Amino acid sequence: DAGVIQSPRHEVTEMGQEVTLRCKPISGHDYLFWYRQTMMRGLELLIYFNNNVPIDDSGMPEDRFSAKMPNASFSTLKIQPSEPRDSAVYFCASSFFRSPLHFGNGTRLTVT
Amino acid sequence: SQQGEEDPQALSIQEGENATMNCSYKTSINNLQWYRQNSGRGLVHLILIRSNEREKHSGRLRVTLDTSKKSSSLLITASRAADTASYFCATDVNTNAGKSTFGDGTTLTVKP
């Protein structure tokens, strides 16, 4: 199994631009999570899906952030418009019911 | 605020020594997990301990859980330079959702 795959690995963009992060979870997993990691705030849960349905998006910081999971093998996290304070490492993770989380290697986002 | 808090924030030891990290949490949990994060990579699951368990072993890892004190510890015995990483505890407070909340982590440095 290739594990959770995230793309791109690095993204540098200018303030105001739209950013789309992508995630392919492990096949057969029914939960998908988006986390953000910064030095100041640590690892924050942004949103998670169960069977492609968003369950809890209370961690999404603002309306500028949106996430979709159109099918069991793909999810996106979009930031529009991006701001410098959005700079962070964004992780996608998947799991099967109660099993532990399997993380991708993250997307390092830099907004200038 | 984060559910789990690790202690110490940073730990530096010599190869061969044991490393102990602690995690405290605030609310009742269903299980507690420990993860490792190498620099520039995603988190990797190490071990899960359920609320009705008190101790669990996996190779050189030993985890204890004290639900009365709402705390857990991770012991790495006979540490190696390759154990250098950040270690996070995560608590699952909602069994059905599988949602895990992470602490701020302990950065472990093992000197050869």
Image (tube, rainbow, N blue to C red):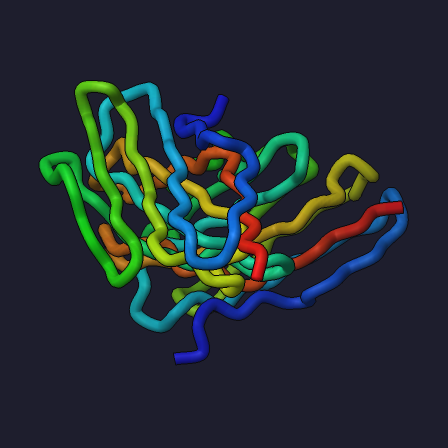
Depth check, front residue: A13 or A18: A13
Q: Position of residue A74 (x, y in %)?
A: 49, 66
- In the image, is A43 to the left or to the right of A31? right
Q: Position of residue A58 (x, y in %)?
A: 48, 30
Q: Is residue B40 left or right of residue B21?
A: right
Left-right relation of A101 to A44? left
Residue B65 in percent (x, y) is at: 21, 34
Q: Is residue A73 left or right of residue A12?
A: left
Q: Nearer the viewer, residue A43 or B39?
A: B39
Residue depicted at x 44% and y 37%? B102
Count of numbered labels shown in the rendering: 0
- Figure quadrant of residue B70: top left
The image quadrant of residue B25 is: top left
Q: Is residue A96 above or below residue A110?
A: below
Based on the displayed image, in which of its 4 quarters is residue B72 positioned? top left
Residue B76 in the image, given as x and y percentages of width and height: 36, 51
Residue under the point 86% across and 43% down = A16
Is B111 rendered above or below residue B4? Answer: below
Q: Is residue A85 visible?
A: yes
Outermost residue, left side: B52
